[in-house]
Amino acid sequence: MPAPAAAAPAATAPTVPSAPPPASGIRFDHVTVAHGRHHEHTVLDSLDLTVEPGEAMALLGPSGSGKTTALRAVAGFVRPVSGRVLIGGRDVTALPPYKRGIGMVVQQYALFPHMKVAENVAFGLKAQKAPRAEIPGRVTEALEMVGMAGYADRHPRELSGGQQQRVAIARALAIRPGVLLLDEPLSALDAQLRSGMLAELSRLHRELPDVSILYVTHDQVEALTLADRIAVLESARLRECGTPQQLYRSPRTAFTASFVGTANLLPVTVRRDGGVEFAGRELAVPTGDAVPGASATLCVRPHLLGLGAGPAPGGNTLRGTVTEVQWRGATHRLYVAVGGHRVLADLRELRQTPPLGTELALHFAPEDAVLIPAGIQPAAPADAGAHHG
């Protein structure tokens, strides 16, 4: 009997090269955007800023500061009058939005009401002419990423606001963008949903290390929670950029101090023997290379002020009169008039609150104060409103 033929060696599957990662990183190269027939109304003034690959950058500022215009310049919805926008090192200034490889989420979700969730998520893939066989898997992948895999067959009207926003994020992620643009995506949600979605966005940022995120918000809590760095804009200009810790603990401008968290900003004069003078009182604080005799602004965060009979050795005392007391759950906020200036103090919930008109002493350590050079006028302490204390 003839010997059986040797089995043919198994065919080796051809190696399929992995797709290159999508272009990431954003560069604003002195970008100016202006409106009007003669470009007389500047809405973004020579923005020079880089978002590194994989970085989450928050653009923080009040209405009209230019933050949304900056995002729209990256998206391709506005054209700069000068400067360049680069994504992944490629100049995209003249490219239409659909050729930029970006995902975008806006505050009003913008879901198609007649389409089911899966169809909404697939929309961008079809627009990009992704292979038809790949689309179902990528839709499922994106929905799983935002915890909405079980809702693929529902219509947007059957979802809550938070669920609709998750679907909008899934739609942006389905195209596997190198850049994700978020334009105040949580502003339409109530406080509890906003907190949950913020945690979800933080998780997504950790799980998508190659995606650059540009996050526009006027809410400093969102910026502090999500961003690796924060760019603070005011009146169409970049005022300061740094990590959340840098901007909160060591702001270089009074505007940043008042917008990134709540701050007491006190006008002081630098003393020749060190320290500063405020409302006739001598205060011991680090003055660095401040010029003796110069005017400056002293920044002290309300939660760093203490209440008591006497300061710790080497500490500072501010004596004043209570003008208002607010209970905020875990804390009381005291408003104290000190030398004609309002000072805020956030204290752990008090068993007995001081009556209005009470004279008391507030204390803070020298290292808990930051001296800001003159040049920007002190702002009133930020209170409940567009951004929170």
Image (cartoon, helix red, strand yellow):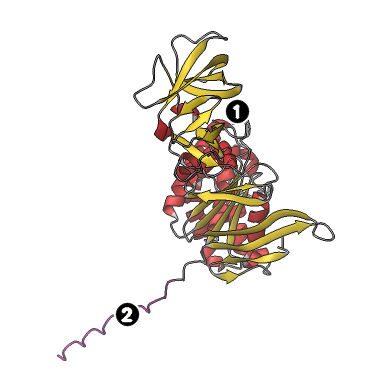
* Res 348 → quadrant: top left
Decide if residue 58 is in sight here. no
**What's the residue type where badge 2 is placed?**
Thr
Q: Nearer the viewer, mark 2 or mark 1?
A: 1
Decide if residue 68 is in sight here. yes
Instruction: Name which of mark 2 and mark 1 comes first in the sequence.
Output: 2
Q: Which mark is on residue 85?
A: none
- The Cα atoms of the two marked residues, 2 and 1, are separated by 66 Å
Compared with residue 327, is residue 246 higher up or lower down, i.e. above or below? Answer: below
Q: Which mark is on residue 12?
A: 2
The stretch in magenta equals: 1-18
* Res 39 → quadrant: bottom right
Dividing the image into 4 quarters, which one contains the C terminus? top right
In x, y percent, where is residue 134?
51, 65
**What's the residue type where badge 1 is placed?**
Ala
**Mostly what secondary structure, the magenta segment?**
loop
Task: Give the residue at x 63% y 60%.
Answer: 74
Q: Which residue is mark 1?
A: 384
Task: Give the residue at x 47% y 17%.
Answer: 361
The 10 Å Cα crowd at callout 2, few under 14, some 14 to 19, many 20 or more, is few
